[in-house]
Image (spheres, grey):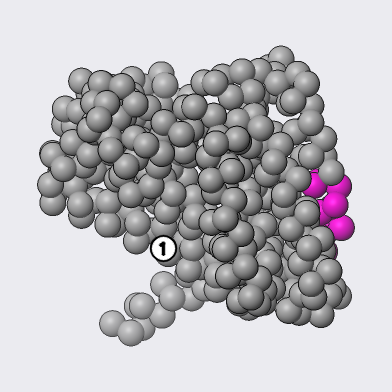
Amino acid sequence: MSTTALPNDRGVEVRLSFLQSRLHLDGLLLTALLAVTAFGVAVLYSAFGEDWAQTQQHLIRVSIGFLALLLCAQVPPRTLQRWAPWAFAGGLGLLLLVEALGLVAQGAQSWLDLGVTQFQPSEIMKLALPLMVAWLLADQELPPRPRQVLLALGIIGAPAALIALQPDLGTAVLVTASGLFVLFLAGLGWRWILGGLALAGATAPLLWFFVMRDYQRERVLTFLHPESEPLGAGYHLIQSKIALGSGGLFGKGWLNGSQAHLEFIPERHTDFVLAVVGEEFGLIGIAQLLAAYLLIVGRGLYIAAVAQDNFGRLLAGGIALTFFAYVLINAGMVSGLLPVVGLPLPLVSYGGSSLVTIMVGFGMLMAIHTHRRLWS
């Protein structure tokens, strides 16, 4: 038996070597991404009411996303480091352009129309910001000194403020987190962390009365008491909880979700797609999906741990933790543990800009890992 297994083992080693040395792809991470994305296609097919035309549109976007991953994986980390300031400046410029010429969709002025397609420049900042903060701290002595921390906070605050003004609070939170994760991985002291939490608590009343808009305050109140408006602001959350509860332990089965197919779940193919997963695949299905997400995050953190320099370590860790925050916020939102902020479930929800951005980020992760022996 050992003699027949040996050629198979060697074959696996050759394939893994080819993936890493020729295509610059990490086999384990790629497999996990493919598995979650394929599961997402099946869930969306059900959420679309078995509409194959819409599912095909999503498959096209998935293909574009994986192509972007493949292309970004070929870019050496040194090149990413050199491009970081330009990527940040370009993203900031596009955010300013949105303020002047952006399209309004679902109450937020966050889209640019390129004629052939529309996209959200805020998605670029989910990668450009951690790139910039990692670039800032890469050649500095760590942990960062107060001057470097203040400069990094200024870099984080500028795009976050522009995105919040659109207003797109969910993306602003995620973009802010992507920069703060890099600072945290750089060894930010607990005094800074506790001071930041204290400042956030002190300014919360000012944000509530003078910055947040009426619908944003309504979302927070609905999060606390969704039953107060069962047919209004609380409808999304109530229906989501019903779908999750009706799925039980094993779910009703693929294509058998009544809440989804009878269109009780709003935004069932975007922000609330996890409710469809819970109804059709149950608690076990959600647990397996979350386990796959943890595998992806864990692999990303491993890549960060074995990176050759500070830039690769900070960028890889920042991308992995931002992806974790993405999943955590959406899952908390759908289950009623967090206010509704309008963030899709990564790799599963329908959407083009978000999916491509996520794939570009994982392409950078793979580049950091597979190019490490080629650096001079």
Q: Is residue 322 left or right of residue 54?
A: right
Is disc 1 placed on a helix, strand or loop? Answer: helix
Q: Which residue lies furthest to the bottom in this view?
A: 2
Residue 19 counted in the magenta span: no
Asked if residue 138 can be seen in this view, the reply is no
The quadrant of the picture occupied by the C terminus is: bottom right
Q: Which residue is drawn at 13% across and 39% down?
A: 246
Q: Which residue is drawn at 49% across and 63% down?
A: 297
The range drawn in magenta is 78-88
Secondary structure mostly seen in magenta is helix
Q: Residue at x 40, y 51 (%)?
A: 35
Image position, residue 353 (x, y; %):
59, 34
- The answer to which of 214 and 66 lies nearer the viewer is 214
Asked if residue 180 can be seen in this view, the reply is yes
Q: What residue type is labelled 1?
A: Leu
In which quarter of the view is residue 185 placed?
bottom right
Q: Which residue is drawn at 38% across and 58% down?
A: 292
In which quarter of the view is residue 333 placed?
top left
Q: Mark 1 points at which residue?
A: 294
Image position, residue 198 (x, y; %):
57, 63
Q: Is residue 239 positioned above or below 224 on the image?
A: above
Q: Is residue 139 positioned above or below 72 on the image?
A: below
- The answer to which of 364 and 223 lies nearer the viewer is 223
Density class for disc 1 (Cα within 10 Å; few <14, some 14-19, many ≥20) is some
Q: Is residue 372 positioned above or below 65 on the image?
A: below
Image position, residue 239 (x, y; %):
23, 31
Q: In this view, does 266 lie to the left or right of 307?
A: left
The quadrant of the picture occupied by the N terminus is: bottom left
Image position, residue 357 (x, y; %):
61, 43
How many numbered callouts?
A: 1
- The answer to which of 133 and 209 lies nearer the viewer is 209
Residue 82 counted in the magenta span: yes
